[in-house]
């Protein structure tokens, strides 16, 4: 089986390249400028894909042009940018890297929470001048209620950190988890939380889960943070 790495070669160490080469009949690094016009041949093949090469969008028409794909390997934990339905319909196995960036993503989300709670963007915009007005009044997080939407690896790690900070942790998940944190309805979570983290996988089952009604039910002072961006509601 052949391996096509649609990814920068410099991301792989010499040892990693050596290990990969021992498991495939041949391996080729494809420059992002040649992705569409490259001749991938007729043999059975595995594709290893870097999402940056595709602007994080991998439609089915990309795969349909390449014959005999058996495996698609992603360099991320998420597969939200791939047409999984097409891969399943064509018996192409999809592989990701589970738990690869759990701590990194969770820590970044917590960093965003502190930045917003302590009004860091406004402080920087104001050249760090001290102004004791409501505009610059900070939120003390200890004792506040935090709601986590989606208790996967990242959501669970966010829970642990918030618990350590002294926050009251509650969560909503599509299936109830055996966790020490309080499980609540989605409506209750949005209505009663001071900080909300959305740590769901981005797929067809979750894409329209967060409605305008839920957002409008939030406290006016609440902070909403997701793993794809932040919103101060």
Image (spheres, helix red, strand yellow):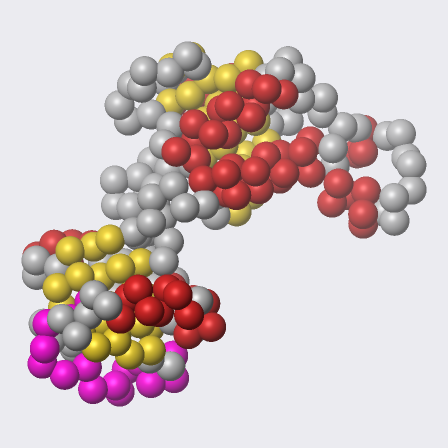
Looking at the picture, tell me which residue is in the foreground, 152 or 131: 152
171 relative to 178 in the view: left or right:
right
Looking at the picture, tell me which residue is in the foreground, 140 or 214: 140
174 relative to 218 in the view: left or right:
left
> Image height check: is 183 above or below 51?
above
Quadrant in which the N terminus is drawn:
bottom left
- Residue, x 74% and y 37% (percent of image)? 119
Q: Which residues are magenta?
A: 32-46
Residue 62 on image: x %, y %? 23, 72
Residue 63 on image: x %, y %? 19, 70
Please tell me whether residue 36 belongs to the stretch shown in magenta: yes
Residue 73 on image: x %, y %? 26, 59
> Image height check: is 3 above or below 212?
below
Please tell me whether residue 31 belongs to the stretch shown in magenta: no
Quarter holding residue 6? bottom left
- Taking the image as drawn, is residue 210 in sight? no
Dominant SS of magenta comes to loop
> Image height check: is 194 above or below 9?
above
- Residue, x 89% and y 29% (percent of image)? 132
Quarter holding residue 85? bottom left
């Amino acid at each position: 089986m052949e391996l096509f790495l649609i990814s920068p070669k410099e991301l792989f160490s010499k040892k990693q390249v050596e290990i990969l080469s021992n498991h495939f009949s041949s391996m080729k690094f494809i420059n992002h400028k040649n992705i569409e016009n490259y001749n991938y041949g007729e043999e059975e093949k595995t594709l290893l894909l870097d999402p940056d090469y595709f602007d994080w969008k991998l439609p089915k028409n990309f795969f349909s042009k390449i014959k005999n794909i058996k495996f698609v390997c992603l360099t991320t934990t998420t597969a939200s940018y791939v047409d999984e339905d097409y891969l399943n319909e064509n018996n192409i196995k999809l592989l990701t890297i589970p738990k690869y960036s759990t701590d990194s993503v969770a820590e970044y989300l917590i960093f965003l929470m502190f930045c917003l709670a302590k009004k860091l963007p406004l402080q920087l915009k104001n050249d760090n001048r001290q102004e004791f007005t409501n505009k610059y009044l900070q939120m003390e997080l200890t004792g506040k209620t935090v709601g986590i939407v989606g208790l996967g690896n990242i959501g669970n790690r966010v829970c642990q950190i918030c618990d350590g900070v002294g926050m009251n942790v509650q969560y909503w998940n599509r299936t109830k988890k055996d966790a020490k944190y309080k499980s609540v309805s989605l409506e209750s979570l949005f209505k009663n939380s001071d900080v909300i983290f959305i740590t769901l996988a981005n797929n067809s089952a979750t894409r329209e889960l967060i409605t305008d009604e839920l957002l409008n039910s939030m406290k006016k002072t609440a902070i909403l943070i997701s793993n794809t961006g932040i919103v101060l509601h």
